Amino acid sequence: MQIRRHIQDIWLQVFPPPPFDMRDDLPVPPLPRGGPAQTKAALDAYLDVLLADIANYAPAAVPSLIVTGAMRCGKTLVARRVARRNGMYHVPGDRLRKATFRNSDEATKQRVIKYISKRLLLAHPTGLVLDSTIFLDRGVTVPHWASTRGIPCVAIGYAQDNPARKAQSMIAFRKTAKCWTSRSKSDADMHKLARQIIWRSKEIKAVCATQGWPYFDLEAAAFSREKRRVVYAIETLLHHGRTAP
């Protein structure tokens, strides 16, 4: 696998795929003024604002996409890169959580994410990139529902990585970038979190194999290279209906 990825990396450096519609004006989805929206009326009011923002952005006519995986796997970074290169509107999972189901119980989280995701994707079957960990938590059916409408779901993770290497990469990352773990987790906690991420990644990889959804294993020590590889594979899926070899 290491040799294959090295060859892929050299190939991408020599023959990088061109961006389809590179845009620098990636929007930031709005937040409700009155705090998290959880009642149907509040959710609908928030969605009206968000959908208007998406319409104003005029995303490209590229099939919408769901990006999922375990926590701290780089879903948002991959989704943002795909959106920017392909003229799509990115709806980050963290942004949706803050806008709607923050501090909610599990049942409320699942109810809200289903409702929001389906409304967004029904309105925009093209041009959106949604990322969230919760898409595959405890039987959430959004990816199943989306796949029947031609909206692909891809997952990323670290099922084959080493917990110590993953922990060190997260510790190094938060020294130079904002990360919620800086406020709440020690280095020892990060090693425990790394083991959880790898365990969860293995579960998600198995689910994807069963459902036929593309899954991409990453190497924690080479995320920049791995992100490039995965983004190009996702673009092949979106534009040609298949994953890259």
Image (cartoon, grey):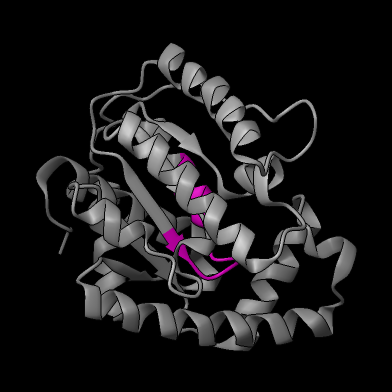
Relative side of 111 to 100, left or right: left
Q: Quadrant of residue 179?
A: bottom right
Place of residue 16 in the rendered image (x, y in percent of width and height, measured from the top left): 26, 42
Q: Let me know if residue 157 appears in the view.
A: yes
Relative side of 87 to 114, left or right: left
Q: Quadrant of the N terminus?
A: bottom left
Task: Name the residue nearer the viewer: 167 or 141.
Answer: 141
Please say if 2 is above or below 183: below
Place of residue 5 in the rendered image (x, y in percent of width and height, measured from the top left): 30, 70
Residue at the image position 67 percent from the left and 44 percent from the top: 38
Q: Quadrant of the C terminus?
A: bottom left
* Residue placed furthest toward the top: 56
Count every numbered label the image shows and give the total: 0
Please say if 165 is above or below 228: below
Place of residue 237 in the rendered image (x, y in percent of width and height, measured from the top left): 19, 50
Task: Name the residue nearer the viewer: 149 or 70.
Answer: 149
